[in-house]
Image (cartoon, rainbow, N blue to C red):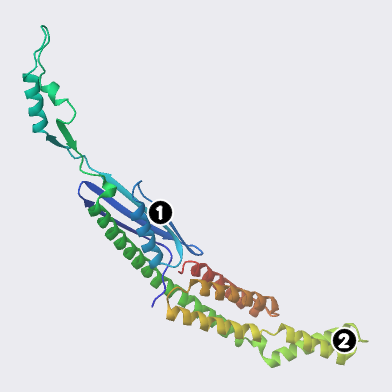
Amino acid sequence: MAIASMTGFAREAGVSGPSQWAWELKSVNGRGLDVRLRYPPGFDAVGEDARGQVQKAFTRGQCQLNLTITRGATPPRVRLNEEVLSALLHAVGRLKLPPGVEPASVDGLLAVRGVVEIEDEGDAAASTELADALKAGVARAVAALAEARRAEGRALAGILAGQLEAMERLVAAIETAPARRAEAVRAKLEAQIAALLSAAPGLDPDRLHQEAVILATKADVREELDRLTAHIAAARALLRDGGAVGRRLDFLAQEMGRESNTLSAKANDVALSRIGLDLKAVVEQFREQVQNVE
């Protein structure tokens, strides 16, 4: 299973009866999964179904899901109640109107309640056909977003792997640095002790040697190098296994940052300091990229 990014965009649109609809789904980085929906009034059931599909598909990221619906103008259906009209005509025909009163006209009879009935096509929110189309549409949008996040994840995996290789090269460079060789450390300690004895002849040479050894031990970066090597191997394993590994990669990146900072602080040689600074820069780049991983 490959890693996935937390950023992506998908859109699905369609037509159902007189209604045109469109789902837009986008996601960005987030510490957890945050799903926010916007949909027209009356579509609560459809919205909750969409929320469930997004929550099932993803584990991290801020997801914004929008539904827009445009309903086209459709002529109403008019039905004439001929039975009521016939009864009215019969009743009017039997009336004896007083002088000056005109008999009822047809348009007047049509205005009587119940003669002409206008039938609505039905509320779009209550349309089963539209609801089914919207559910199928959001499922396609979620699938498209998942694929977009996986595609970006594949690109991210290549970048992260390259940064891990760069860290490994820098760690190896520190391992083999001339300043870390035993003879170089010994020569540097002897030179420092000789300088101190020359400046202050009354100092105890044995005590100076003991203090120098203690300082050299504290300045050694063996533990930092071992931990960095272990963190790099763990990060590689997470990239290989894939899935929702963003949080664990972020934790490893933080630990790498601590070790590289300590290593740089301990460096007592110009060449080691330069390599340490390069290592810190790569670790920081790695950490920034990890923020995009689900």
Are the residues at dot 2 and dot 1 in contact (C-beta closer than 8 Å)?
no
Amino acid on which the number 1 mark rests in the picture: Leu
Indicate whether 94 appears above or below 235: above
User: Which residue sits at x=19%, y=28%?
Assistant: 113
User: Can see residue 251?
Assistant: yes
Along the horizontal axis of the image, is 183 left or right of 256? Answer: right
In the image, residue 200 lies at what x, y percent?
Answer: 90, 83
Report which residue position mark 1 lands on: 37
Which quarter of the rendering shows the N terminus? bottom left
User: Can see residue 176?
Assistant: no
Amino acid on which the number 2 mark rests in the picture: Leu
Q: Nearer the viewer, mark 2 or mark 1?
A: 1
Front in this rendered view, residue 179 or 256: 256
Q: How far apart, in angstroms, are the residues tagged by discs 2 and 1?
A: 76 Å
Would you identify the image quadrant in which residue 98 lies?
Answer: top left
User: Which residue sits at x=34%, y=63%?
Assistant: 142
Front in this rendered view, residue 56 or 200: 56
Q: Which mark is residue 197?
A: 2
Indicate whether 55 appears above or below 263: above
User: Which residue sits at x=17%, y=31%?
Assistant: 114
